[in-house]
Image (tube, helix red, strand yellow):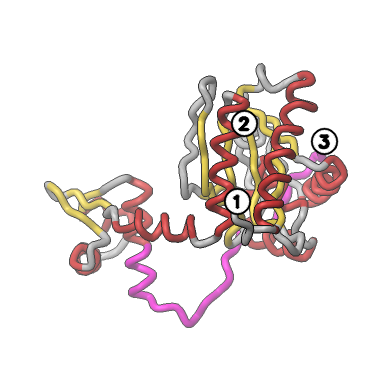
Amino acid sequence: MRRRNKVCTTVSLEKSHPETVKSAETAFDVLELLHERNGARLTDLADDLGIAKSTVHRHLATLEKRGYVTAEESVYRTSLRFLDFGERARTRERAYVLAGQKVNQLAEQTNERAQFIVEENGEGVYVHRATGSNAVETDTRIGKRVPLHASAAGLAILAHLPRSRVEEIVTRRGLPRLTTETITDREDLLEECERIRERGFSVNRHGYVMGLSSIGVSVHDRNDQPIGAFSVSGPSHRMKGDWFRTQLPDLILGATNELELKIAYSGASDV
């Protein structure tokens, strides 16, 4: 890929919502910090959020009463109630359920790590992941959000979104650099999207994690709109040669084609 000397200066900005409720925002700040830290004490939360301990305590007490937070030995954590929310979101679309079967199949066929990612609010979200016998573990997990431009699945999705939507995502989320190989220039991203459309799949070498390479293929609905993407990732020393250039893309393209057929004929009795 052609590299420019300049670094993309796009600023990641969230849209302003003057109608938001401040107390609700604080409650979510508390939850997100608990999630990020995998648990924290009241004093630490107050210090990190820069608000009074009494305020944080009221929010924690409310969240605990509603069952969204648990407390043990003065350490607060998000509760398993979120598991119900997450599973409901993951299974609300028939295509998401069917994709899980293909992710398991790809992991078994390749012995590497396979995943299905969808776009939500300009980010990639892991909906399914599975590991083969030779897979290496990274910090991926179900529900984790990743920059679309830095992952193979994310690039595959971006390549098939309307350009106006891609521009909107870049303006809102920016193109943060995760490694020295991450795409950080808007024009480079648009050129890569064009190559992905021509090739039929995305190639990501070291863009998310150094030493990791991936192939991604977007999945489309009956109206040819991208609903997500498969990808298979592995150590770059294994992801090379004809296996990486031809065989692996063919496996993922085949799984994608089968899933798209099931989506198109989801009323069939064999689905």
Residue displayed at 57% across by 49% down: 98
Q: Main secondary structure of the magenta part?
A: loop
Residue 9 lies in the magenta-colored region? yes
Q: Position of residue 190 (x, y in %)?
A: 81, 51
Where is mark 1, residue-wise?
270
Q: Tell me the crowding category of disc 1: few under 14, some 14 to 19, or many 20 or more residues within 10 angstroms, Cα based.
A: few
Residue 21 falls left or right of residue 239: left
Spot occupied by residue 43 in the image (x, y as percentages of width and height): 21, 53
Task: Using the image as rendered, state which of residue 130 and residue 161 is in the foreground.
Answer: 130
Rendered location of residue 24, percent (x, y) = 36, 73
Q: For marks 1 and 3, give the CA distance.
A: 43 Å
Considering only order in the chain, which callout, 2 or 1, is on the residue closer to the N terminus? 2
The residue that label 2 is drawn on is 233
What's the mark number on residue 88? none
Whether residue 11 is visible, yes or no, is no
- For label 3, the SS is loop
The image quadrant where one finds the N terminus is top right
Distance of label 1 from label 2 (alpha carbons): 30 Å
Answer whether labels 2 and 3 touch (C-beta < 8 Å): no
Looking at the image, residue 196 sits to the left or right of residue 120; the answer is right
Front residue (pair 93, 76): 93
Tell me if residue 18 is in the magenta stretch.
yes
Q: What is the three-letter code of the residue carrying label 2?
A: Ser
Segment tinted magenta in the rendering: 1-28
Closer mark to the observer between disc 1 and disc 3: 1
